[in-house]
Image: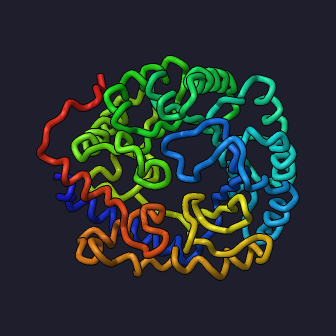
Amino acid sequence: MVSEIPFRKRIAFEIFRKYRRNAVTIHQLNYLFWECTLRCNLKCLHCGSDCRMESSAKDMPVDDFIKAIDEITGIVDPNKTTIVFTGGEPLLRSDLEICGKKLYDRGFPWGTVTNGMLLNNSRLNSLMKAGLRTITISLDGLEPQHNWLRGNQKSFSQALAAIKLLTKIPDLRFDVVTCVNKKNFRELSEIRDLLISTGLKEWRLFTIFPIGRALKEPDLQLDPVQFKSLFSFITEERKRSKIKVNYGCEGFLGNYEGKVRDNFFFCRAGINVASVLADGSISACPNLRENFIQGNIYQDNFRDVWMNRYSIMRDRTWMKKDECAECNFFRYCGGNGLHLRDEKNGSLLFCHLNRIKEGEGQMTNPPHST
């Protein structure tokens, strides 16, 4: 049973718990997201921001964002603080390279997350000259399933072309993320083989949760048996070592911790991770809005916000309520990822451990690992 954690692993959890407490005390900013646009050239069924090609929210001027970055320069080591452009679709901005070069000149490594629709050799060269260090491409199934999720019949071919292009760049770190759902669950082994054939080295798998547009799409949610089977698949893939597979930075997974990703679960939102949203709001992960907003770069000094706010994220004792109140694993889980909390009342929307427990003892045909 996943809930029956061996003694040695519990010891490891206790050591990691102390590390987590120390990280909260230090709260060193190491990862910063910039939601540089709400415009997007796709209309994905699982989008949490309801992005569209034409957005009423104008793109933030580069200099406004750089001003906020200059405010935190004194409390971070630029070489150890990665800045990631997200959206929307970042490559819709023609001035992305201008911002990237300004960050590069200040010593910050930067990267971007993209659907690949606009990535070609010319644009990639332009981004690389501006200091691009990391890039993530989304591929969410074989062609029919990917195009269904992304809402565009050309999205699969464009994403695959982008992946093949990136495998030819030796000094650029990149990975592919796949959002696992009911429609692509059975083809994970085929997706794996396709990615290996391109020369890809790193593959991240996420599961989709009922927020944003995903609320209206039941086919996006794995049932408990599929959910548990996914972690068995990842465990076996990591043993094979033909491609480095990690589950995303989602919730606590009980005995699967240490088996499906490189580190134990730790929601670092507001502890090591911050974000500047499209309207200047200062938060942690871009998914955290509403009551999780800590300030705004147009009214507040970013340095002061990072140093003196974020208490709702650094002291999470308030999360020990409802089903978490009596849970023996709260000391290791900490209440799950903040993005899986209701932004108005803080109630837990999804518990990974409970979903895995629901799937134990039931049979399904898992995605093949051979």
Residue extending farthest top: 197
Depth check, front residue: 294 or 8: 294
User: In screen coordinates, is 6 left or right of 30?
Assistant: left
User: In screen coordinates, is 214 left or right of 154?
Assistant: left
User: In screen coordinates, is 121 left or right of 22?
Assistant: right
The residue at 47%/30% (across/down) is: 148
Q: Is residue 84 above or below residue 125?
A: below
Q: Quadrant of residue 89?
A: top right
The residue at 83%/60% (across/down) is: 66
The residue at 52%/78% (across/down) is: 312
The location of residue 239, given as percent across then percent down, is 34, 34
Q: Is residue 288 above or below residue 223?
A: below
The location of residue 285, given as percent across then percent down, is 57, 60
Q: Quadrant of the C terminus?
A: top left
The location of residue 152, given as percent across then percent down, is 57, 28
Q: Quadrant of residue 276?
A: bottom right
The location of residue 114, given as percent across then percent down, is 64, 38
Depth check, front residue: 231 or 169: 231
Q: Is residue 15 visible?
A: no
Depth check, front residue: 233 or 223: 223
